[in-house]
Image: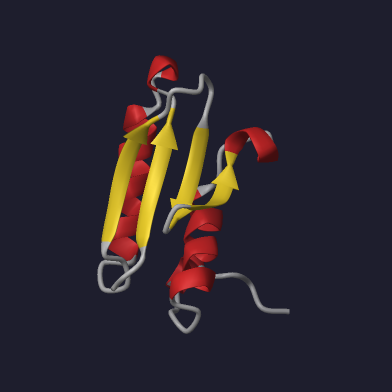
Amino acid sequence: MKPKITLEYCPKCHWLLRSAWIAQELLTTFEAELGEVGLRPSDVAGSFKVLLNEEVIFDRKREGRFPEIKELKQLVRDLVAPEKSLGHSDKKQG
């Protein structure tokens, strides 16, 4: 079974559009590697989390910020498809 990403966001903060955009970016980049990217409204105010198979891999409150899309793609790649090249979004070597 392919991995599932869940974006848990605060609807009171109006973060649905941000979450939908991130979902689109992840689905476009990892269409062959991911089985699903889902959006989940949170009951916790100010919450924005990225989960891989229900394990938190990024938490806005813990990090004190939102993830940059490049950073998030690298994180997901490292966990689900370490051999995949992200092209211009890839980490600089050296």
Using the image, determine if residue 91 lies above or below residue 16: below
Quarter occupied by the N terminus: bottom left
> Residue 92's x, y, as percent?
63, 72
Q: Tell me what residue is drawn at x 53 percent, y 64 percent.
A: 74
What colouring does the structure picture have?
A: secondary structure
Number of numbered tags placed on the structure image = 0
Q: Looking at this view, is 40 or 22 the one in front?
A: 40
Q: Residue furthest bottom?
A: 83
Quarter occupied by the C terminus: bottom right
Displayed quadrant of residue 62: top right
Using the image, determine if residue 48 lies above or below residue 75: above
Q: Looking at this view, is 48 or 22 the one in front?
A: 48
Q: Tell me what residue is drawn at x 42 percent, y 59 percent.
A: 53
Q: Residue furthest top?
A: 12
Q: Tell me what residue is drawn at x 41 percent, y 15 percent.
A: 12
Specify whether 35 is left or right of 79.
left
Q: Tell me what residue is drawn at x 34 percent, y 53 percent.
A: 25
Using the image, determine if residue 5 lies above or below residue 78: above
Specify whether 89 is left or right of 27.
right
> Residue 20's x, y, as percent?
30, 39
> Residue 57's x, y, as percent?
56, 54
> Residue 10's x, y, as percent?
44, 25
Q: Residue furthest right?
A: 94
Specify whether 21 is left or right of 56.
left
Using the image, determine if residue 80 lies above or below residue 21: below
